[in-house]
Image: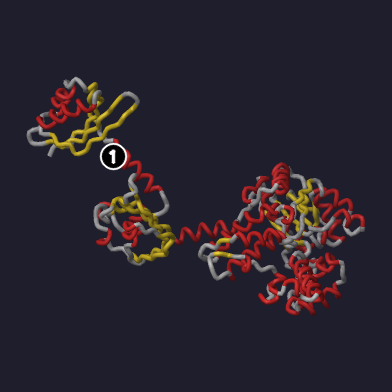
């Protein structure tokens, strides 16, 4: 059979022209398979896909007869109809999407299926298009229910093909025409493995940048702007902020923004004994002390190379180490323990503390010369209570991460829950907020997290009856409850009980007695942090 003839005609007086065109086509035994009309400014174009018959003349003769019609300005053969071009573009777009997509018409026949959906269903497109959905080997035919006006979202499905098992989430939507009549339905299939991988990557936040910082408060934006400005320099940065404000995140973002080729190595100066901290930072030679490796070991300054070393809680560094640290930050030189040889290092130094360094210098508990060396670029991170407008943003951000990590149904915070979060004092800052949100998401029995599910650390031992007593509670009980709350918050926002006692203005022994009275389980927990 001769191939179809495809034409593009430019016409005027379209109604009169179409009658004459139809007459010419009929006389030449040509059948119109498809016709499309396009308007472009003042011009009108008619596209024809014609099926030739046994009595059809040659193509040139047909052109001559059409061009002889007074209303036709031009006639030309084309290879592809506009509709075919649009369908090809549409299919390319569909095949570029990472989710599976299929659609049906109002008769329940498959009209569209993309590459991913074909892979999941293990079928070729020509085997599926035009077939009834109910006749296909599918785990379910929920899409047909959309033809009755129903929809569904994120329904978990599984499909086994050979030795492979696909798990995916499906979402079905209705397709309506301009008159709101249902003319079909579309289903989107999302691979569960890819969703988990994406959610895990987002939740872990392996490399923090300033773009990942959540919050729009002026105080936070000002701190970020200053940190971005100094990141590209090699000057020492001193990050100041209360416990839990995110000092390490800021340090990591500065490292990323600086373009340093080496690694980012954090170390908590308060978490290690003096002798161990020294060997960790500066390394040692073989036989330097009992238990040392025979071959010696490089310290973190050497390991960081051209990267960044982050010294958290530098105010807790012992005085003897402060002198050695001064040599490193001043001249870029260090000696391993037990060695007389100096090693040159080229490591960016970022320090952080939640203590008042100026006050410690006055008390001669921190070297003045080291203070001026590390305080070249001080970055002050505002506490959460000074950026309350950011609390809803942070809460939703943490909730998204927690929902993804635990593969839970989507949890949402009610207005009451958000109001309770905003009104809290947040002594533990962003770290405390994250803990509260995770606790609420896990313990909440529904998708809506209300204010009753928001439980701060000092509330965990309270019963609902205690809360309902309100103002009728005796004064002594109210004072005791407030004292418990203050102690719990100080413990949560301090790295050790000794620091918590200092913040509370009491001795370590007095705090332990209070813990034994109010929090017996806490008093015996984590004694290494005393």
Quarter of the picture holding the N terminus: top left
Q: Quadrant of residue 455?
A: bottom right
Q: Residue at x 81, y 59 (%)?
A: 339
Q: Please rate how many residues cluster around mark 1, counting C-alpha atoms within 10 Å: few if below 14, some from 14 to 19, many from 20.
A: few
Residue 504 drawn above or below residue 149: below
How many numbered discs, if any?
1
Helix, strand or loop at label 1? It is: helix
Q: Position of residue 136 (x, y in %)?
A: 27, 61
Front residue (pair 14, 228): 14
Q: Is residue 280 above or below residue 76?
A: below
In this image, 143 relative to 445: left or right?
A: left
**Residue placed under numbered mark 1 in the picture:** 84
Is residue 290 visible in the rendered image? The answer is no
Quadrant location of the C terminus in the rendered image: bottom right
Q: Is residue 372 above or below residue 478?
A: above
Name the residue at 58% across, 63% down: 402
Indicate the quadrant where residue 418 lies: bottom right
């Amino acid at each position: 059979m001769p191939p179809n003839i495809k034409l593009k005609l430019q016409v005027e007086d379209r109604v009169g022209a179409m009658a004459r065109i139809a007459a010419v086509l009929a006389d030449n035994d040509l059948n119109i398979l498809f016709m499309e009309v396009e308007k472009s400014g003042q011009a009108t174009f008619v596209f024809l896909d014609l099926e030739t018959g046994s009595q059809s003349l040659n193509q040139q003769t047909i052109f001559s007869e059409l061009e002889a019609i007074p209303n036709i300005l031009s006639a030309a053969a084309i290879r592809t109809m506009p509709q075919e071009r649009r369908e090809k573009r549409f299919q390319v777009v569909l095949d570029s999407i990472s989710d599976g997509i299929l659609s049906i018409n109002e008769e329940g026949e498959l009209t569209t299926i993309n590459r991913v959906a074909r892979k999941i269903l293990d079928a070729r497109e020509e085997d599926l298009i035009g077939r009834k959905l109910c006749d296909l080997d599918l785990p379910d035919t929920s899409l047909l229910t959309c033809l009755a006006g129903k929809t569904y979202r994120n329904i978990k499905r599984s499909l086994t093909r050979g030795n492979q098992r696909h798990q995916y989430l499906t979402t079905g939507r209705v397709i309506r025409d301009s008159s709101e009549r249902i003319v079909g339905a579309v289903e989107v299939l999302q691979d569960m493995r890819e969703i988990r991988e994406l959610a895990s990557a987002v939740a872990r936040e392996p490399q923090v940048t300033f773009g990942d910082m959540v919050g729009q408060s002026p105080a936070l934006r000002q701190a970020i702007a200053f940190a971005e400005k100094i990141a590209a320099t090699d000057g020492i940065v001193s990050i100041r902020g209360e416990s839990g404000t995110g000092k390490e995140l800021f340090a990591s973002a500065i490292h990323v923004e600086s373009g340093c080729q080496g690694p980012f190595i954090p170390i908590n100066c308060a978490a290690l004994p003096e002798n161990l901290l020294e060997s960790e930072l500066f390394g040692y030679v073989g036989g330097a002390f009992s238990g040392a490796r025979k071959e010696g070991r490089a310290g973190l300054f050497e390991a960081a190379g051209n990267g960044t070393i982050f010294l958290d809680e530098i105010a807790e560094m012992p005085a003897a180490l402060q002198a050695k640290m001064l040599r490193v930050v001043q001249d870029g030189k260090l000696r391993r323990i037990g060695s007389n040889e100096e090693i040159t290092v080229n490591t960016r130094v970022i320090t952080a503390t939640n203590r008042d360094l100026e006050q410690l210098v006055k008390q001669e508990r921190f070297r003045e010369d080291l203070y001026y060396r590390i305080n070249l670029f001080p970055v002050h991170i505002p506490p959460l209570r000074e950026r309350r407008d950011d609390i809803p943003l942070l809460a939703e951000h943490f909730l998204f991460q927690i929902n993804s990590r635990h593969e839970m149904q989507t949890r949402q915070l009610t207005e009451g829950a958000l109001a309770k979060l905003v009104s809290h004092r947040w002594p533990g800052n962003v770290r405390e907020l994250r803990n509260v949100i995770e606790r609420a998401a896990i313990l909440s029995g529904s998708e809506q997290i209300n204010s009753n599910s928001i439980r701060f650390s000092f509330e965990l031992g309270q019963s609902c009856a205690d809360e309902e007593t309100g103002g009728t509670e005796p004064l002594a009980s109210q004072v005791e409850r407030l004292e418990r709350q203050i102690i719990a918050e100080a413990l949560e926002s301090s790295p050790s009980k000794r620091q918590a006692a200092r913040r509370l203005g009491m001795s370590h022994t007095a705090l332990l007695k209070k813990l034994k009275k109010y929090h017996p389980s806490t008093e015996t927990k984590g004694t290494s942090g005393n």
